[in-house]
Amino acid sequence: MASPSTPVATTTPTTSPAPAASVAVPATPAGVTTTAPSAAGGGGPGRRTLLRGFTTAGIPGGADARERRSMSRRRPTRSATAPALHSGEGDGMLVDIKDRFEAHPRWNPVFASAVRVLRATFYAAKDSTAMANAFTAVGVLPSSPVARIRKLRVPRREDLVLDGMSAEDAKGVIVAEWVDFARGRRGSVSASSASTSTAVVEAADSQAEDVAPSAAASPQADRRVVLYLHGGAYFFGSRKTHRSMTWRISKYAKAPLLVVDYRLSPKSVFPLALQDALSSYLYLVNQCGYKPSEIVLSGDSAGGGLCFAVLLWLRENAARGFGMPAGAALLSPWMDLTHSMASFHVHGSHDYLPAVAGDPKFISASRRHYYVTDNSQLTNPLVSPFFSKEDPSNPLPPLYIHAGELERLRDEIMYAVGHNYPTSTIELEVYEGMVHVFPLFSMVLKVGDVALQHIGDYIRRVTDKSPGAAGCRRRLVFIEMEAPFRERELTVAEMDRMIEQTSAKLAVRSPSQSSIAVPASSPSEPVAVSV
């Protein structure tokens, strides 16, 4: 579809362009407004957008970076109608206005303070890759004194050269660590059959156990393992910043975790992180001796989206015979890097996530995220799994996904589960009043620990092949934030109403927008909010 000079909204479905990889892009679900971006916007042909006009109003295309950063950091007034994002015919860049932080009235004070601190850290790092790198280098969250942590290097698969990368990009090693809550067991982590030539075991950066490298061997009784991919918007974070969660997942899943430091942007862009994730998965199969049915992928935020991308790549390359893992446990997975859903722009007052990254050395109108080289890649399902769709003839393995009711990514997660994967075996849990990846706060938040227990239960069930095993089924629930953490069924129609409500809130906050489309309860009955 040819892109006109100005965006034109329509409520008829469209088909996104074929991605660079071999993943088919589905037709846009009915009820979703499709906007053909202008040349200045750089969004690529057929880009699906729920929100129009999110550009820097009044900032001319030649405005210098200092002025742009200054204007993007201005705080909104307390007026109820103050727009969260400006619209206009500017340079096509998103503007991030930092909403005033509002703690949920039922959050405990310690949790509220922790969210406030993490929010301040993320907002400080979002416009400076140097600060993000510093946070990644020094950020180490505590582990358990009985958790075994061993550092290793995983070789990249040199025969795995994805579209968009060179043969040289497939060389080298990936720094990783085994995390195992193995009380009373020594030498219980690392590969059962990997030699020191393929996995160099070293002392961990911190909290290293005192097991000699020669004792590294996986117990044959534990026939499940988790490959964990950390979050951090693809440009910061590490295996060390997520230790407060990884040791708990190991404890509840009764399995070791291989946690990898995949390559980060902007130095390494798509698809290099995906190649690292695939190499790590195949390392578990080929060097460690695990069957695919004994492996569960897990990750949070960008790491969750990366796990989804691994599944999509394996699905579309089934002929290579790598095999699907048993399942994937995804914590607030980042599904849509185009930010097309309303909750991303409405929930900024509660969530700690900033809306956009803006280091002017890398971000421009044609490149809105560090992870990609230009905006045309943002709708590739291997970058934004939101643009993928289920294939009943070649299904994904059972998935466990959770989201916070007040997080920015809530709507994209619910919409993908309800509409893009309407019959797939997915266990979705939406937690009342919670923010993005709230289990990070499990040391001060009981419901965060409960969510990790649910993940551990899922991992045990999805890898249990014994007769009469409980297995997994499609299950959508809403869970209360306080004990006894009651659950109630969550229907697709109810999720659609929640999405409509956030879209309506955005319409009130941004009256200058001419049209905001929201998913309909029935795909045949599109609902649009006109402003």
Image (tube, helix red, strand yellow):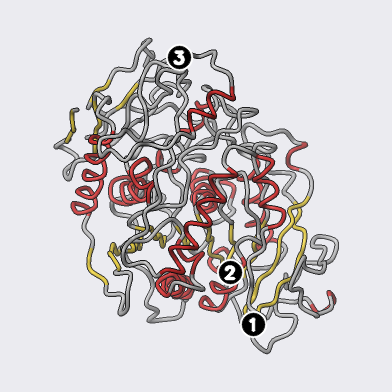
Using the numbered discs, state the Cα–Cα distance from disc 3 to disc 2 in whole angstroms: 45 Å
Residue 358 horizontal/vertical position (percent): 56, 33
Residue 188 horizontal/vertical position (percent): 70, 80
In the picture of the structure, the residue carrying the numbered disc 3 is 39
Task: Look at discs 3 and 1 and give the one toward the viewer.
Answer: 3
Above or below: residue 226 compared with residue 78: below
Above or below: residue 23 compared with residue 484: above
Instruction: Out of 140 and 81, give the one closest to the viewer.
Output: 81
Looking at the image, which residue is at 54% across and 60% down? 297
Q: Tell me the SS state at disc 2.
A: helix
Sequence-first disc among 3 and 1: 3
Res. 143 image quadrant: bottom right
Looking at the image, which residue is at 43% across and 23% down? 56
Using the numbered discs, state the Cα–Cα distance from disc 1 to disc 2 in whole angstroms: 15 Å
Farthest residue in the front direction? Answer: 78
Farthest residue in the top direction? Answer: 5
In the picture of the structure, the residue carrying the numbered disc 1 is 182
Q: Amino acid at mark 1?
A: Ala
Instruction: Out of 327 and 113, give the one closest to the viewer.
Output: 113
Q: Tell me the SS state at disc 3.
A: loop
Res. 88 image quadrant: top left
Above or below: residue 514 compared with residue 145: above
- Quadrant for the N terminus, please: top left
Res. 529 image quadrant: top left
Q: Residues within 10 Å of mark 2 (few under 14, many from 20)?
A: some
Is residue 178 left or right of 334 when viewed as pictured?
Answer: right
In the picture of the structure, the residue carrying the numbered disc 2 is 244
Q: Residues within 10 Å of mark 1 (few under 14, many from 20)?
A: some
Q: Amino acid at mark 2?
A: Ser
Looking at the image, which residue is at 24% across and 37% down? 518
Residue 437 horizontal/vertical position (percent): 46, 59
